[in-house]
Amino acid sequence: MELFDYSLFASAIRMVSPILLAALGGALCARVGIFNVGLEGLILAGAFSAIVGNYYSGSVIVAVLTGAFGGVLVSLLFGLATIKFKANPIVAGIAINFLVLGLTTFGLRAIFQVKGAFYDKDMNGLPKWDLPLIENIPVIGKLLSGHSPLVYTAFIAAILLYIFLFKTVVGFRILAVGKNEAAARSLGLKVTVLQYGAIVASGVLCGLAGAQLSLGQVTMFTEGMTAGRGFIALVAMMLGQSHPIGMIGSSLLFGLMDAMSIRLQGFSMPTQFTAMLPYVITIIAMFFLKDRGLESQASGQQSSR
Amino acid sequence: MIAVLIGLLTGALAIALIGESIFDTYKVMWDGAFGNFYFLTATLARATPIILIGLGLALAFRAGVFNMGAEGQMVLGAVCAALAALYVPGSGIVKLLSAFLAGFIAGGLWSLLAGWMEVKYKVQLLISTLLLNYVAVLFAGYLVAEPFQDKSGSAALAQTPMIDQAVWLPKLFAGMSVHMGFVIAVIGAIILYVVLQFTSSGYEVRMLGKNPFFAEYGGINKQKVLLFSMFFSGGIAGLAGTVEVLGSQYRYVEGALTVPGYAWTGLMAALLANSNPLGTAVAAILLAALQTGAMGMERNTEVPLEIASVIQGVLILFVTAKFTLSWWKVKKKAGDVNGAV
């Protein structure tokens, strides 16, 4: 078995998409000054509602839509707590994670009468799309073709978000809110509306990430199936400096490490160190990339600066 | 109190949804947490690491730093304590003391690293502690999977060998799971309360958290206080891991500390109690009771145990919302006074 081959990179691209989608959602929140620790819960909600939608409709499109809707519902709750009731976003995010973990397990019991995992052979997974033209190019075709539509959506969403944030008026307003909320408010920007908008959009993105998780490889839902991906997305967001293109890079790094550590198990090598690498890189990167102080402002942390 | 009611109400709604009797279920839950002496001690045993984690975090919060790294600090403390108990030569008491020391120092240094990066290089502590969790948990996983793995058993589990019986923390009651660690946790809560409330260094910590500018103006060395708070905060979290290893697991087992979510529950306890050490201990016991109660409930009814995390989540959401609301009111009042003048 080779360490590096096409399938390694192909699986890395597949693993990237939920992380990238969620990281984009988190970045949108960060850009309006809300540090969203609840990504994990949002993804899980998306994964669960996608399966519910799939089970009752039998249609993949409906499943993806309900997945996004599930993410939006939970994100609205998060928005209500942080914006309307001025709860500390970090605490509210942690609470959301617990809440969704409980609710989905509960729903599993209430809707499907099963415990642990739900699988139904009649459910349809996401189709694999072969890209015309590209699939015929020797190396690149193998890498890029044959993924689920949501994988492509993730990368397109990153590019769209880049255009939206840096090339449109609304995007500039969002950046302004994140830079200085009070100043943005005094300029007459509808800060609250923008913040709700960003949170709902992040709910959609995380919901899609969840749908890719539960419908992408195998069509099933297991308790707590996000397994820390929300937090990894958070780290990818920090490493990418909440910049869409930067986050494509950082998510690819995490996806590659993820795929590598699975591959290395076949070599009976300690996988812990490869798994550790992205976090260490992020910490080192934080030495060099002086942040705008955005997250610390959002968390209300008073520290030595 | 309202938050507790709303949390329980949400739980009731969920129970009703899957068609179980609300009162019977809550009664089973209560019995599972406090029903008899055995369950009561099980609750207290579960509360032990949660109290210690909560205390460590409460100290950091009081100093105004958002330490999110309790999980890593606890795990490193646990694994170092286990290794010290295994490999330090000497009698049982020497091993015991060195295990405690190792656990405390390991957790403390890990936390200090984040504090140092914040003070020296302005690397945000909130984020770095979160990241260091992963590094610590993975590193501990490596230690018990490779160099220090228990090779004696037939199954190759990721765990250290069992530590010597002389190093075990004694159980408080024969046959019950609550151990000396609980006493340590309660004493720790009282000590922390006294230190924060009645000593000058405690005053410095609180002042730094309340108003860092005033603290500096008052001649407090901000960086020193912050570093000390972080060291002790992580150290106490390390102790949480230590007492779990010495009191109930008797070895470091990968995942035994992270899977039950002790660190996050401890964080919630500290937040529920608004970082008051004594209140944190009470909140930790309540949250532990919710969890053991839910386990009992799962054994006896059709309701899954995750209802505990639903109730916890709602509880925390409402507490934070309410807490900041009252804070906001105070601020508004202050604003009015200024306006009148």
Image: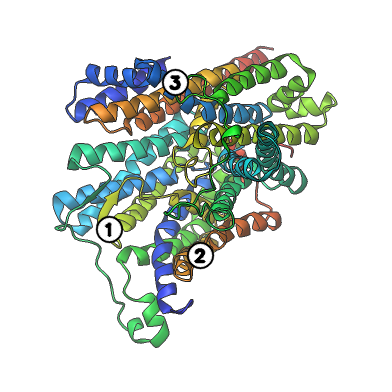
Q: Chain of mark 1?
A: A
* Separation of marks 3 and 2 at Cα, in angstroms: 43 Å
Residue at disc 2, secondary structure: helix
Q: Chain of mark 2?
A: A
For marks 1 and 2, give the one nearer the viewer.
2
Q: Amino acid at mark 1?
A: Leu
Q: Amino acid at mark 3?
A: Thr
Residue at position x 44%, y 57% from top? A19
Q: Amino acid at mark 2?
A: Met
Q: Nearer the viewer, residue B311 or A287?
A: B311
Query: Which residue matches tag 1?
Result: A215
Labels 1 and 3 positioned on one and the same chain: no
Q: Chain of mark 3?
A: B
Residue A105 at x, y = what percent?
29, 39
Query: Which residue matches tag 2?
Result: A257
Residue B75 at x, y = what percent?
57, 42
Question: CB of mark 1 within 8 Å of CB of mark 3?
Answer: no
Query: Which residue matches tag 3?
Result: B41
